[in-house]
């Protein structure tokens, strides 16, 4: 198997993908600056993996630090997760998002090229589709963004697409995540947002565990079956396994690809609330309030290309997502550092 560098390795998606890569037999070097994650993840991953994980504390905005890490570890490929990801925060701090997300990506690509490494998986997002014109969303749907966070993902994709056109040594995967939720079934690692959660599932978890009073449902008058927003929730371990499949495709010489990582099925906010109450046995009180600026009514993937090209499909149900999220949250009411 191969040696893979993960940037943003102690984050939510990174930590779960780290475990999936180890379970698939890869050697992994994790890199993070703990800007949005806890060092405690390392002990949990070592416990789950049954081996001490290999980790380097570094910042993707530090080219020298990146070069030193890559000179210490001969790697075959990389997965770039490290990025800020809060839509609302990106509107307040656009330059910080451009610098970190686009500048960091360029530093990683430069450091890889300097070491003769040309296989990269890039963490992109369904946010690049903007307001979808058709549903389900195929990979060749029009691309547009409505906030600086989404722009950093779209610009990142465009830079990588041009790079591989200019230099065919590059083999790059661009993975467009829909809505990752849940946690590893052990309950030892999970989603641990700082401050007030922006996303639905961590907020629901915190209401159920009692650290928040009630969920505000952003809009009850959308053109959807129950009036609330519909999204394509995907279990984080399905997402992690999608990265393993993408990495295998690159390492086997399958070439560059752009794929959706979603289930293809949409669920409304109220369906998620109901599923979570059933999974946790806890009430999730909510109040329907005004729509959130920038939200779309519905967004869910056409997942057929990932199945055809990578032989991967999401397989975990919404109830499994809720059960696994609850196991993590109920064991960690205030996250890793609570
Ligand atoms: C889901 C649904 C809300 C919170 C965002 C980013 C995307 C990706 C995933 C990074 C919507 C509703 C939410 C709440 C609510 N992030 N909601 N009350 O907006 O689909 O996607 O996160 O890659 O890039 O755009 O996810 O979880 O914020 O919202 O009613 O307190 O839940 O209106 O319908 P979203 P979300």
Image (cartoon, helix red, strand yellow):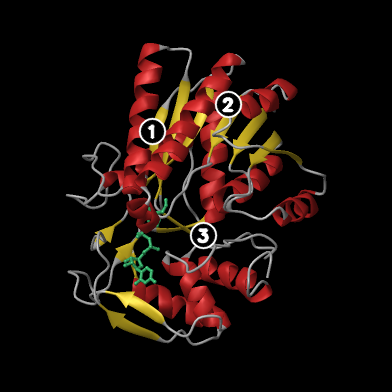
Q: Dot 2 corresponds to which residue?
A: 63
Q: Secondary structure at mark 1?
A: helix
Q: Dot 3 corresponds to which residue?
A: 316
The part of the image, by quadrant, that contains residue 56 is: top right
Q: Secondary structure at mark 3?
A: loop
2 vs 115: above or below: below
**Which numbered tag is attached to residue 156?**
1
Q: Can residue 310 be spotted in the picture?
A: yes
x, y percentage for residue 183? 59, 61
Mark 3 and mark 1: Cα distance apart in space: 29 Å
x, y percentage for residue 241? 56, 45
Mark 2 and mark 3: Cα distance apart in space: 39 Å
Q: Can residue 264 be spotted in the picture?
A: no
x, y percentage for residue 204? 47, 75
79 vs 252: above or below: below
Mark 2 and mark 1: Cα distance apart in space: 18 Å
Ligand 1 found in image quarter: bottom left
* N-term mark: 3 or 1: 1
């Amino acid at each position: 198997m191969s040696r893979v560098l993960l940037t943003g390795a102690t984050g939510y998606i990174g930590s779960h993908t780290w475990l999936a890569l180890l379970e698939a037999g890869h050697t992994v070097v994790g890199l993070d600056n703990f800007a949005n994650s806890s060092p405690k993840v390392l002990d949990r991953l070592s416990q789950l993996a049954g081996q001490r994980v290999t980790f380097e504390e570094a910042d993707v905005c530090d080219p020298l630090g990146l070069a030193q890490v890559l000179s210490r570890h001969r790697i075959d490929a990389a997965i770039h997760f490290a990025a800020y990801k809060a839509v609302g925060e990106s509107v307040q701090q656009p330059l910080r998002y451009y610098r970190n997300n686009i500048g960091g990506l360029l530093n990683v690509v430069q450091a890889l090229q300097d070491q003769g490494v040309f296989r990269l998986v890039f963490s992109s997002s369904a946010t690049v589709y903007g307001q979808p014109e058709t549903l389900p969303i195929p990979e060749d749907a029009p691309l547009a963004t409505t906030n600086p966070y989404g722009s950093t993902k779209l610009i990142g994709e465009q830079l990588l697409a041009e790079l591989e056109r200019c230099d065919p040594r590059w083999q790059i995967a661009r993975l467009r995540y829909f809505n990752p939720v849940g946690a590893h079934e052990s309950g030892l690692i999970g989603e641990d947002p700082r401050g007030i959660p922006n996303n639905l599932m961590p907020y629901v978890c915190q209401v159920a565990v009692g650290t928040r009073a009630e969920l505000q449902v952003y809009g009850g008058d959308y053109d959807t079956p129950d009036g609330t927003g519909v999204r394509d929730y995907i279990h984080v371990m399905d997402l992690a396994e999608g990265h393993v499949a993408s990495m295998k495709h690159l390492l086997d010489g399958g070439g560059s690809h752009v794929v959706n990582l979603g289930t293809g099925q949409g669920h409304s906010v109220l369906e998620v609330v109901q599923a979570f109450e059933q999974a946790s046995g806890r009430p999730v009180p909510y109040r329907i309030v005004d729509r959130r600026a920038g939200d779309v009514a519905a967004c869910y993937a056409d997942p057929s290309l990932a199945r055809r090209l990578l032989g991967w499909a999401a397989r975990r149900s919404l109830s499994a997502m809720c059960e696994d999220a609850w196991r993590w949250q109920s064991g960690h009411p205030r996250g890793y550092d609570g």
